């Protein structure tokens, strides 16, 4: 898989944080010396900031001669990280949606470069497995004040995201736990829900897609009480896995404790969910029921 701008920024940030630690400097000390804000350096170290060549040179000069030996490699990462992602032509349509799409650039950047993704979804089925018809209903419900042309572009955006499942080299390994609530809340008429169920059955035959249903009678647990979330994972040890917690104010976690906690929550949830085979049977019955 090729390395994109999000991966480059994350690797650059991890290296800058390591070099600062080795130099024995705090964020505050580094910022004071360079006469910039701590948030600027923090954003570079977390892969959120747009890396500039001058910033990298200044930081490595501050961190000492040993750090400067990494200059060429880190400048290369900075150049790669400064490139625009394909998704930005779509996310630029969303400046007036600070909550619904907060962090969209970062999420899609990570998703498009990830090796695997696990997700627990409650309100609707996951965006990567939505049919065009179902996705159109979701987008229009979430963004009622956008124009038809903007909504069409955002639908195209969602469908383009789904290409990670069918990319020719190392397609994304997707593992979903879908709450029954997502199916009991109809988007559109019964026909939309039936066709979405058949779409899921078709996708579930792919070797890189696993879908399991969490039925109502599974009850409530610590894993499900907190709402929907995703763990975005990378096989390369240089890249840290990230948790995305979806809600009114979306947030990301990248510390080891937080990521491991959500990985365990997903594993625990899997013990309550139906098996893949049972989920397929449930979807078949559901498709028949809503058609009546």
Image (cartoon, helix red, strand yellow):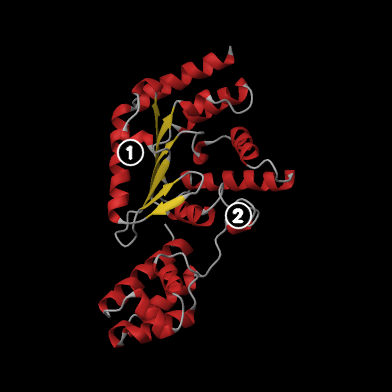
Q: In terms of secondary structure, where does tag 2 sit?
A: helix
Q: Is residue 283 at all visible to an observer of this figure?
A: yes
Disc 2 target residue: 91
Q: Is residue 72 at all visible to an observer of this figure?
A: no
User: Which quadrant of the figure has residue 1?
Assistant: bottom left
Q: Is residue 51 above or below residue 58?
A: above
Question: Dot 2 surroundings within 10 Å: few (below 14), some, or many (20 or more)?
Answer: some
Q: Residue at x 43, y 84 (%)?
A: 34
Question: Dot 1 surroundings within 10 Å: few (below 14), some, or many (20 or more)?
Answer: many
In contact (CB < 8 Å): disc 1 and disc 2: no
Q: In terms of secondary structure, where does tag 1 sit?
A: helix
Q: Which mark is residue 266?
A: 1
As rendered, which of 148 and 26 lies closer to the eye? 26
Instruction: Give the residue at the far top of this rendering.
Output: 292
As rendered, which of 142 and 33 lies closer to the eye? 33
Q: Is residue 59 left or right of residue 144?
A: left
- C-alpha separation, residue under disc 1 versus residue under disc 2: 29 Å
Q: Is residue 198 above or below residue 124?
A: above
Residue 165 lies, in percent from the top left, at 47, 44
Q: Residue at x 46, y 49 (%)?
A: 168
User: Which quadrant of the figure has residue 292?
Assistant: top right
């Amino acid at each position: 898989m090729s390395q994109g701008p999000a991966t480059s920024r994350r690797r650059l940030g991890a290296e800058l944080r390591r070099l600062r630690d080795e130099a024995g400097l705090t964020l505050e000390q580094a910022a004071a010396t360079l006469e910039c804000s701590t948030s600027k350096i923090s954003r570079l170290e977390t892969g959120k900031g747009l890396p500039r060549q001058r910033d990298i040179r200044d930081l490595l000069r501050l961190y000492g001669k040993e750090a400067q030996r990494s200059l060429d490699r880190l400048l290369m990462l900075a150049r790669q990280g400064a490139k625009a992602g394909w998704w930005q032509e779509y996310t630029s349509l969303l400046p007036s949606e600070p909550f619904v799409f907060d962090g969209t650039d970062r999420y899609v950047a990570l998703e498009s470069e990830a090796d695997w993704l696990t997700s627990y979804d409650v309100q609707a089925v996951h965006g990567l497995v939505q049919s065009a018809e179902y996705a159109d209903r979701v987008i229009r419900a979430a963004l009622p004040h956008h124009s038809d042309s903007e909504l069409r572009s955002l639908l195209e955006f969602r469908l383009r995201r789904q290409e990670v499942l069918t990319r020719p080299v190392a397609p994304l390994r997707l593992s979903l736990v879908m709450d029954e609530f997502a199916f009991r809340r109809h988007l559109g008429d019964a026909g939309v829900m039936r066709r979405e169920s058949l779409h899921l059955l078709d996708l579930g035959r792919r070797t890189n897609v696993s879908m399991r249903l969490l039925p109502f009678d599974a009850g409530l647990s610590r894993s499900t009480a907190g709402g929907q979330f995703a763990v975005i994972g990378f096989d390369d040890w240089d890249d840290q896995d990230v948790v995305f917690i979806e809600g009114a104010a979306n947030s990301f976690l990248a510390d080891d404790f937080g990521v491991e906690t959500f990985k365990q929550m997903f594993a625990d949830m899997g013990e309550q969910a139906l098996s893949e085979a049972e989920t397929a049977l449930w979807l078949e019955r559901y498709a028949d029921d809503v058609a009546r």
